[in-house]
Amino acid sequence: MLTDEERTLLVVNCGQLLTLRGPRRPRAGQEMAALGLVRNGALLLRDRTVQLVGSVDRIRKAPESRRAVCLDARGKVVLPGFVDSHTHALFAATRVDDYVARIGGATYEQIAKRGGGIGASAKLVRVASEQALVDRLERMVKLFLEYGTTTAEVKSGYGLEIGQELKMLRAIRSVATRGTFDLVPTLLAHDVPARFRTKRAQYIELVKRELIPQVAREGLAEFFDVFCDRGYFSIAETKMMMNTAASAGLQLKLHAEQMTHSGATKMAVGLRSVSVDHLDQVTDDDIRSMRGTGTMATLLPGTVLHLGPNRYPPARQLIETGIPVALATNFNPGSSPTLSMQMILSLACSQMRMSPAETIVASTINGAYAVGRGGLVGSLEVGKQADLVIMDVSDYREIPYFFGMNHCETVVKKGAIVYRKG
């Protein structure tokens, strides 16, 4: 059994300590520039939670700090662990053939028709054992931590068939229950299996009558999501499935307005979705419909970069309208093969004109609210889970400035050091 001293960690000499303290809700508008920055800060972590936070002089003098294990940040930037609120991190293998085809001029839809895309990932999942999927996701978790992500949403969606979707969700649960990383499971209706191409209604009934109820009974997912876009699920199909999921107790998310404008955003808002994700083709009217509803916008600029010429979502307009914005990687083998939130911050600044402070808020506390974890993670406040990263920079603005680089030096998860570079 650990002693009190071994369960207590004192983090000192934080050159810039970004606490993200603020209201107990997603941050919007001007709040997205507020980092709760403490210069020369410190934290006391005990029993997995933040016990004290403030200036180093004050925290060092606290009686509880006297016998704690000391972690010296050496004047570097300390911030909450990133919360990656939209990923497809469980997949059986890469889709590098799709990547090469896209370089040659093929579109996402053309690749899918040739047997690539989601269908290719589904074939690979089908032949993989549940244990193989568990092992792969464990490797991904280690990489997430290495890049400073301490909580991530993970979707199913590469199973397609009922049994394969359940296999994916059980693999996610297996990794999640090990407790070294917070995984938020989402059931995703991604596409119709090949054998149901001419029987779409039959497949949707299977999702409604078999898949969603079983997932809910077993507690395999917290959220339900649908890929609503041209060539995938229509507005009508999506609404039917989302209503069933909501009735079963699952929270809602939605892939909306990515490749085409469908009107899915307004539908999702009407169904009280926690977030609408992508929004590359969102309209002014859609944005107005989101204002004041509580539905968040989760933006995925890595996808736009990887798929090629397209417009980035209008982050500035969303923020200035008062919509809470989250950033996520959309880590997946087809359209965004990166799990680096730091790279996403760089893209958000350079391509969507978000400020460095706004990207930090969007990737920590707002990401946490986008996966129902805002009361637990995403900020360094007394009573919250002690998840933090030390970045090897002296100014938080350098995190997006040095694009494509990994600044993560140390990761603390639930009060314990779980990663150190070198």
Image (cartoon, rainbow, N blue to C red):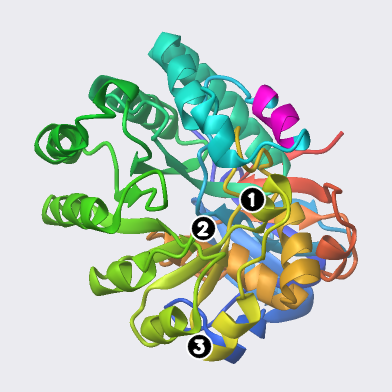
Q: Label 1 vs label 3: CA separation?
A: 24 Å
Tell me where residue 75 sits by quadrant.
Answer: bottom right
Q: Is residue 22 left or right of residue 128?
A: right
Q: How many marks?
A: 3
Front in this rendered view, residue 16 or 338: 338
Dividing the picture into quarters, in which one does residue 420 lie?
Answer: top right
What amino acid is at disc 3?
Answer: Gly
Label 1 Cα neighbours within 10 Å, binned few <14 / some 14-19 / many ≥20: many
Q: CA distance from mark 2 to mark 3?
A: 21 Å
**Which quadrant, please, contains the C terminus?**
top right
Range shown magenta: 97-102
Give, as a three-letter code, the residue at label 1: Thr
Q: What residue is disc 3 on?
A: 322
The x and y percentages for residue 278 are 52, 60
Residue 2 to residue 128: above or below: below
| Residue 277 image offset from top left, x and y in percent | 47, 60
Which x, y percent locates residue 7?
A: 56, 46
Closer to the chain start, of discs 1 and 2, is: 2
Disc ID at residue 258: 2
Task: Give the residue at mark 1.
Answer: 303
Dot 1 and dot 2 residues touching (CB under 8 Å) = yes
Q: Specify the principal SS of the magenta part.
A: helix
Residue 295: x percent and y percent?
37, 73
At 45% from the left and 11% from the top, the residue drawn is 128
